Image (cartoon, rainbow, N blue to C red):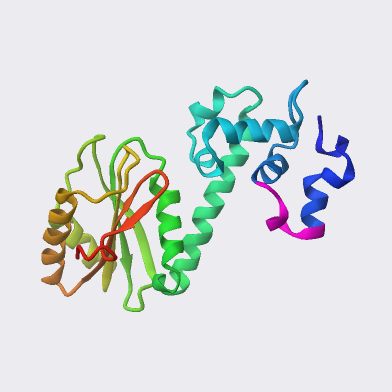
Amino acid sequence: MLLKDLPVSTRPREKMLALGPASLTDAELLALLLRTGLRDVSVLDLAQQLLDSFGGVAQLLRAGPQELKRIKGMGPAKRAELAAVLELARRSLTQEFTERTLFESPDKVKDYLRLQLADRDHEVFAVLFLDAQNRLIELEEMFRGTLTQTSVYPREVVKRALQQQAAAVIFAHNHPSGAAEPSRADEFLTQTLKAALALIDVRVLDHLVVGRSEVVSMAQRGLL
C-alpha cells in the first residue's frame, strides 16, 4: 500500500506539513522514508514492524546492511535511504561542532558520539581534537581492537595532537558489550594519556564511554 492510498488524515506527509515533524510518531517518520509497504502489509505497519524488530528507531538506524537485508521489504533502495539519514545526522553535528564550542551543548556531543561509535562490533578509540575555543578540528578514530581490548599508544596521540595543533582533546571509546560503565583500565589509560599530553600543554577535557543506549562522561564521574 502506498502512502497516497491512505486516508488523508492519516498520511504522514500531510500531517507533518500541517503540524510539523515533531507531531509524527517514529513509525510515521519511518514510513515517509520507506514510502511503500508489502502486498499484505501497509507502509505504516511495515515501519512499526521494523521498529519492533530492532527495539526502536535508534537501534534501527544503527543496524548494519546485513541485518537490514534479512528483513522482508528492505531492498537496496530502502537500506540506502536509512543509511543516508544517519550519515546526514553525523555530518550535521560535525559541522555544528566545527562552528561553535562543544560545551554549549554537551548532550549533543554524546548524541554525536553515539551515532559515530555505538553500532560497532569491535572496540574503537577515538579522539576529538579541539582548538583553543573548544571547537572541533577533527574526530579521528585512532585505534581499533577486539571485542575485549584496544591497544592505545600515547606517543601516537601526542603526535596527532601536535599535527592538528590542538589545544584540547576529548577521548571516546565504545563498549561493544553495550554497557557504558568505565572500567579501571579506562581510568588508568585516561590518566596515562593525560600525563603525556600535559607535556605539550594539551588539555584533556573528558573521556566518554559509549554504550548501545548510553554515553557516560568520566569527567562528570570525577574520574579525570
Q: Residue at x 74, y 33 (%)?
A: 43
Residue 184 on image: x %, y %: 15, 50
Is 128 contained in the magenta span?
no
Q: Residue at x 24, y 39 (%)?
A: 145
Q: Residue at x 71, y 51 (%)?
A: 24
Relative side of 9 to 76, left or right: right
Relative side of 87 to 34, left or right: left
Please indicate, yes or no, whether residue 166 appears anywhere in the rendered image: no
Q: In the rendered image, which quarter is residue 121 located in? A: top left
Part of the protein shown in magenta: 18-25
Residue 110 on image: x %, y %: 41, 58
The number of numbered discs placed on residues in the rendered structure image is: 0
Relative side of 65 to 77, left or right: left
Q: Is residue 163 above or below residue 43?
A: below
Q: Residue at x 23, y 60 (%)?
A: 160
Q: Main secondary structure of the magenta part?
A: helix
- Comparing 169 with 107, the one in front is 107
Position of the C terminus by quadrant: bottom left
Residue 183 on image: x %, y %: 19, 48
Residue 115 on image: x %, y %: 45, 50
Please indicate, yes or no, whether residue 125 appears anywhere in the rendered image: yes
- Comparing 119 with 145, the one in front is 119
Position of the N terminus by quadrant: top right
Q: In the rendered image, which quarter is residue 19 located in? A: bottom right
